Image (spheres, rainbow, N blue to C red):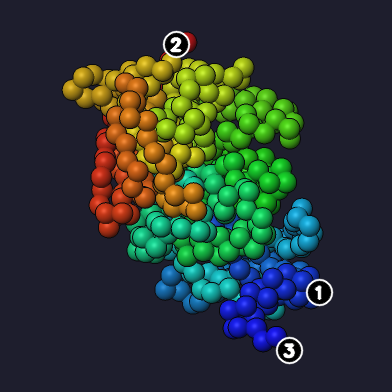
Amino acid sequence: SIKMSPVHAACALLFAAPLMVLGVPPIWTQPEQVHLSYGGVPGTMVVTWTTFNETESKVEYSLLGARLFEMSAIGHATLFVDSGTEKRKMFIHRVTLGDLKPAASYVYHCGSEEGWSDVFFFTALNDSTTSSPRFAFYGDLGNENPQSLARLQKETQLGMYDVILHIGNFYPSRYFIIQHCKRDEFMRQIESIAAYVPYMTCPGNHEATYNFSNYRNRFSMPGQTESLWYSWNLGSAHIISISTEVYFYLDFGQDLLFKQYEWLEKDLEEANKPENRAVRPWIITMGHRPMYCSDDDQDDCTTFESYVCKSVVCLEDLFYRYGVDVELWAHEHTYERLWPVYGDKAFNGSREQPYVNPKAPVHIITGSAGCREKTDKFNPNPKEWSAFRSTDYGYSRMQVVNGTHLYMEQVSDDQNGKVIDSIWVVKEKHARRMS
């Protein structure tokens, strides 16, 4: 007989594993992949988690320092069948906590009598228009090579952030074959962040598999659009999340492209009503694929005729016309800060103070949090609107300080958390622009 080495035996067992799993139905009732999101209504928080058997959907919670788990809320579970060859079933649980006290800290766990999660804590969002919320934001964080993850985990648990914005591309590359386990693995990895602060998302190109079905089912953003696009308010900011992918995956239907644009125009119209813009003057957008970039990879944003910029339903003109202040992007595995830009030209506030009363939106691209495709390279000859560039792994921070001042900075994980770039955007007047 032929003897197998331990390595060969392990490999044989690894390749046989999918077959063994296929023969045994999942029996897990244990909650996992716990994450929070803001419900869009003041005083709410949505808790989302996964089990592989159907169970009750319950959150037990209490104010920090009060009798543990003295309050409870019941939600519902939705059966999600993955479109892959295994047709794997999972149950996505959602529970909305209401009547939360602004800025109060809560302790919670989720699950049922058949299994409970770890104990987590969160701070309810302060819905006052005079609050100064703090954000971490980034895109393209994968479950392979997630270099910034450890630093983000620690800073989140230290209470440095009120909200995390993940600007598309979760999981591994969309071309990776064994995707179901990688998606679960990623959701387990971010639990150490997303179970403590609202984790607000938008879809990227890596979520496109099976018509974005995993993204639509796993996340719980405000509104009734399966988390594809939505808006919400925090402090003096109105924040809009969009799907840039509706411009690229037209095989899934063009109706989403026009539905989003129609919704977006109405949302911007509402945000610009004098009574609304007076209390929430900042309008901030987030979407995965940028309008502009100076990467050397021939991506859509390297050409002025980009789909997002210049299509029939043109986002650049819409954002400019309705006075959007800041636009956050990812997709490029780099960090790039732009001068205020519109129509491929820089529109600085002044030579000495470019971000004081800028004459066009300010763009930030932050897609270098860490993924299996590594970081990108830059074009050595960027256009005039490119202000600062870095290929370090890292992520961004933002604080909406008040109605006139907003601060952003870039953290380099390669340089042990050093802040390598920072700006103040100052707007004494926020308003629609004449087209």
Residue toward you, 160 or 65: 160
Q: Which mark is residue 1?
A: 3
Q: Which amino acid lies under the numbered mark 1 shown in the image of this protein? A: Gly
Which dot, 3 or 1, sits closer to the camera?
Answer: 3
Q: Earlier in the sequence, mark 3 or mark 1?
A: 3
Number of numbered discs overlaid on the protein picture:
3
User: For the view shown, which residue lies furthest in the front direction?
Assistant: 1
Label 2 sits on residue: 434
* Label 3 residue SS: loop
Q: Which mark is residue 309?
A: none
- The residue at 73%/28% (across/down) is 255
The part of the image, by quadrant, that contains residue 13 is bottom right
- The residue at 48%/23% (across/down) is 303
Label 1 sits on residue: 23
* In this rendering, position of residue 141 left or right of residue 223: left
Residue 233 visible in rendering: no
Q: Earlier in the sequence, mark 1 or mark 2?
A: 1
